[in-house]
Amino acid sequence: MKRIVVLLTLFALFGSFAGLQAAEGVKPEATAERDARMKWWREARFGMFIHWGVYSVAAGEWKGQHVRNAAEWIMNSADIPVAEYEPLAKRFNPVKYDPAQWVKLAKDAGAKYIVITSKHHDGFCLFDTETTKWDVVDATPYGKDLLKPLSDECRRQGLHFCTYYSIMDWHHPAQQHGPKTYNPTKIIPERKAEYIEYMKTQLKELLASCDPEVLWFDGEWPDWWTEEDGRNLYNFLRELRPAIIVNNRVGKGRAGMEGLNKKDREYSGDFGTPEQEIPATGIPGVEWESCMTMNDTWGFHKYDTNWKSSEKLIRNLVDIASKGGNYLLNVGPLADGEIPPASVERLEAIGRWMKINGESIWGTTASPFAALNWGRATVKTSAAGTTLYLHVFDWPSDGKLLVPGLRNEVRGAKLLANGESLELSSDKKGAVIQLKDKPVDPIDTVIVLTLEKAPEIVK
Ligand code: FHN
């Protein structure tokens, strides 16, 4: 009982998971400090994920056979021994790699950050590391670090640069693996400390060379990796770079934070990471980011043409923002550095919508409504007042849009796209907005309501 009282006191004092780690060695972080550290990330709402590596050469095919499952898993899916997998690196030569073009594509789409794989489960490093020859400098004809140019371009164009890093490593000798035993790996117990040092050395190299603002861990599920290991790694990174943000897959929080949403549990990491899903009601009280693919695979897969529509991707972005989360949307470049045209087409479509409606996503917080049958809502509050963004997916056939339960006095109502004022009345069910017969954008037409203060909703 005493431990719970101590924890609740710590939580009350520091109000965050990071604060709860005070007992574990990270200097206490007051809520105001955490708010400052997380500010850019919370306001970003939209990032671009990049899965790229030696697996992009195979592109979902091995010895002429179509290998199903995600392309970056081909070593496991096709049971490829390390010695047979390594020669793929000799064919990894991204001569079309253009960091400036990649960053511009993300920026024009409305993304505020990029998360790129620095090392996926196959252990191949896209950065120059002294720890192994299994990296882009020593093992490929390209022979140059890929991440630093991208981080430099991100900073030049005003995006935040972040890196993904897999704890599970199918190439490192401390992790027993091999055909049919790649996932999950087993650690050789007397070599676990050696592997943790290997990771820490690589993470220090990453911080020194390309200074990622988020460390996006993955591959945390093998049972030899514990929540305590994750907390120690979290503390190690926060000591090295106090402003860094780390996801909950540094430890075992992936199931805890968003699956069980046990806010009283201590999980290392700063945000939850639902994957290929949008939590139905968000994850109240927890920062979270939903990572999703455009088709079905993360790494480039030549056979995967199951592309989601631009409409679906835009509405995912709006749905996630309306639930208080971030959308991390993935692209899987080809081995030569080209981004698939189908991905470019969709990012450009998202960008056209964001160019007009971005303010209804960036810097907003979750909808105050339980549910809206015609769309979603996002909110932006400031000293000047409150702005309620109504995202209308299904345009009302009678031209009357009911905003259920809204009791605030509304100072104004307009279409975000063209500033056209809208008539608004209220009845016992809430506010009713009189709309024209056609939407401005059939995917999502945004209506802006200006309120004196935070929305008052009568359930
Ligand atoms: O196994 C990986 C997978 O390849 C991909 O990187 C995703 C992205 O979040 N994470 C793991 C599966 O959860």
Image (cartoon, rainbow, N blue to C red):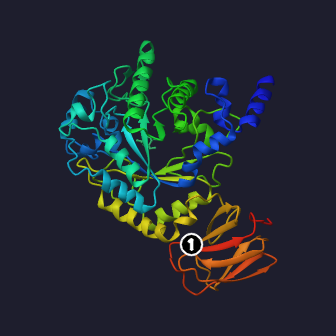
**399 w.r.t. 84: above or below:** below
* Residue 143 image position (x, y, % from top left): 21, 36
User: Tag 1, which secondary structure?
Assistant: loop
| Count of numbered badges drawn on the protein | 1
Residue at coordinates 50% horizontally, 32% vertically from top-left?
Answer: 221
Q: Which one is nearer the viewer's eye here, 11 or 179?
A: 11
Q: Is mark 1 within 8 Å of ligand 1?
A: no
Q: Is residue 317 left or right of residue 379?
A: left
**76 w.r.t. 413: above or below:** above
Q: Which one is nearer the viewer's eye here, 348 or 178?
A: 348
* Residue 162 image position (x, y, % from top left): 44, 43
Image quadrant where one finds the N terminus: top right
**327 w.r.t. 6: above or below:** below
Judge whether residue 3 can be spotted in this image.
Answer: yes
* Residue 35 image position (x, y, % from top left): 64, 45
Residue at coordinates 36% horizontally, 46% vertically from top-left?
Answer: 152
Q: Is residue 266 left or right of residue 352?
A: right
Image quadrant where one finds the C terminus: bottom right
* Residue 203 image position (x, y, % from top left): 42, 30
Residue at coordinates 33% horizontally, 54% vertically from top-left?
Answer: 102
Q: Farthest residue in the top direction?
A: 190
Count residues near mark 1 (Cα–Cα under 10 Å), then give few for <14, some for 14-19, many for 20+. Answer: some
**196 w.r.t. 104: above or below:** above
Judge whether residue 278 can be spotted in this image.
Answer: no
What amino acid type should be assigned to the residue bearing mark 1? Phe
Which residue lies under the disc numbered 1?
Answer: 393
Residue at coordinates 50% horizontally, 25% vertically from top-left?
Answer: 225
Q: Which one is nearer the viewer's eye here, 51 or 357?
A: 357
Specify the quarter for ligand 1: top left
Q: Is residue 266 left or right of residue 82?
A: right
